[in-house]
Amino acid sequence: MAERVLARTSGRARVAAGEYVTASPDVLMCHEALTMCASQLRRVGVEHLAHPERVHVVLDHFFPAPTAAAARDHVRARRLVEQYGITNFWGHAGICHQVLVEHAAVRPGQLVVGTDSHSSTYGAVGAAGAGIGVTEMTYALATGELWFQVPPTVRVELVGTGGPALMAKDLVLALAGAHGTDVAQYAAIEFGGPVATAMSIAGRMTMANMGAELGAKFACFPADDRTVEYLRDAGAADIEPFGAEPGARYARAITLDTTGLAPHVACPHNPGNVRPVTEVAGTAVHQAFLGSCTNARLEDFAVAAAVLTGRRVHPRVRFVVTPASQRTFLDAVRAGYVATLVEAGAHITASGCGACPGGHQGLLGPGEVCVSSTNRNCVGRMGSTDSSVYRGSPAVVAAAAVAGELIDPRELWTGSTL
Amino acid sequence: MSALGVVRGRVWAFGDDVDTDVMAPWSVITRPFEERRSQVLHTRPEFARDVRPGDLIVAGRNWGCGSSREQAPENLQLLGVGAVLAESFGRIYFRNAIAIAFPNLVCPGIAAGVRDGDELEVDLDAATVHNLRTGTVLRAQPYTAEMAEIIRAGGLLEVLRRRFGGDDGLGVRLRR
């Protein structure tokens, strides 16, 4: 899939792994980094963007503005959006990747670059999404182009049956645990197999998102009928399926069998320090966090609500819930999930990146332990350098919120989203 | 074609999976460099305190994994680190380093044979790493022509400046 995308966007009939190409991304996603790009553009004499119509801007990392400086930066970002003629301005609609996918702003087969490492998320709808830094985005904004080395592709075959309390997050954690967080370093991942075919777009977004935590440049699911239907419902006409060419060859193939798989967690302080949650059951937690571009979608709210129905959040625990987007929030309100969560004692915050990168709306103090549905848990990620983060599925997070300690979520919920 | 040159310096040795969060914590990420300085690689506080211009970093696997924040390689560059040699790199970090013309080379076998305080001489063009303490010479993966061209230009902003004719920093407008 990656080769097809890079061939089309570089104007070639075909490309092979290892080649260098200059490609024209279809979508350029900027969050608050836009202001840094603008400063660089001014310094190098660029006043106009090559393709303002391809640029999407979402203000999510510092929303609602936690400081006066952040508010000032947002004022500047809004002015830049006007100045550059950027019409795809999503304001504060939620976390960038969620907003673009749920509005069908990204299509199968497209090349997407974003100033956020989790831009791999767009692979959930069959696009090739890669995170880049500010200077590379500045270059891409100015020229409409960027260099790419065509990555080798690692095929990840997902087979087996769903088990109690099993979610997409457990699968990708299990992959990181078994194969390491550099299993797809510099490579593209292509997910496939019956479990991938049956997986919801929400689940695919979780796995593609975490491709960044496996070292991948892109992490793609083929765009199938489910993708087409999702994007049509999101308002996009003329969507076609997209996948690898028949007979595509892979640098490596990995199979993950979900049959009998236990819910997993990544323990402090590394995304690859993965164990079945049963091995760390009993670890006391002070905060449970359901949020981030990895796991704060409607499906995740549904699971958390299922776990918390008729139960209470443990008195020691702050259960902080940050919806992935305003649309998710509204859908969760309408579905009754928010009432269930708040009744149980959860705190709902405005949608955005929130506490995930250590920003605001629920940071950790010294000695505190958080169980989190997010993507990273390096030292100090969510606050104090003396805090610890265990990462798991929304089911793991919600179950720990009730118990006050890590427990096997199968004790409280036997459904599955697979 | 100008050379990337040779860097020689004292080693700070790190392990595997050092995340860009640790090189550039979120709490100070939007602050000016002088305010970020003491927090660079904060899990080892003596680094930011004692690092000297020209020092080198040697690391294990996956140096710079994690976030796309460019402040990670930028902080190291601004501290004067001459180059980073690692078994492997997080891909966004690696691209960011190229974009800002900060030398980072993949060097298989480097983590095992090098320790804190070793003196290394790194030929960035030949991609050789000479350990002056042990006498061993390792071969790193040389930059490809495409990468070397960006670094020689002084980074992607310099490439843009030449193309779009921005101020060269000395008040001279360059030709397109």
Image: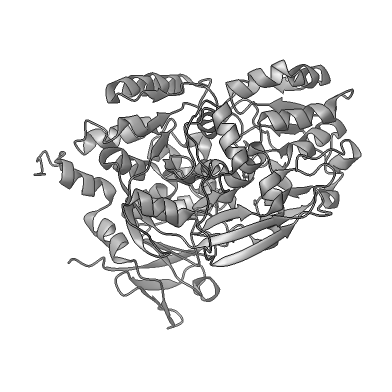
Q: Quadrant of the C terminus of chain A?
A: top right
Along the line of sight, the residue nearer the viewer: B175 or B40: B175
Q: Can you name the residue that lies furthest to the bottom here? A: B135
A95 shown above or below A248: above
Vertical order, A218 against A229 (above or below): below
Q: B170 or B89, which is in the foreground?
A: B89
* Residue A296 vertical position relative to residue A26 in the rendered view, above or below: above
Instruction: Estimate the x, y position of residue A336 in percent, counting from the top left.
Output: 76, 18
Left of A400 or right of it: where is A36?
left
Q: Residue at x 46, y 23 (%)?
A: A90
The structure residue drawn at horizontal position 54% and vertical position 47%, both measured from the top left corner, is B22
Direction from residue B95 to residue B64 in the image, left or right = right
The percent coordinates of residue A363 (x first, y second) are 64, 31
- The answer to which quarter of the image holds residue B10 is bottom left
**Residue A408 position by quadrant:** top right
Q: Is residue B50 visible?
A: no
Query: Could you tell me residue A220's position as x and y percent?
Result: 55, 49
- For this rendering, which residue is in front, A42 or A46? A46
User: In this orientation, does residue B155 appear?
Assistant: yes
Q: How is the image coloured?
A: one colour
Tell me the residue at 37%/54% (across/down): A7
Tell me where residue B6 appears, x and y as whole percent.
29, 69
Q: In the rendered view, would you say B46 is above or below A142?
A: below
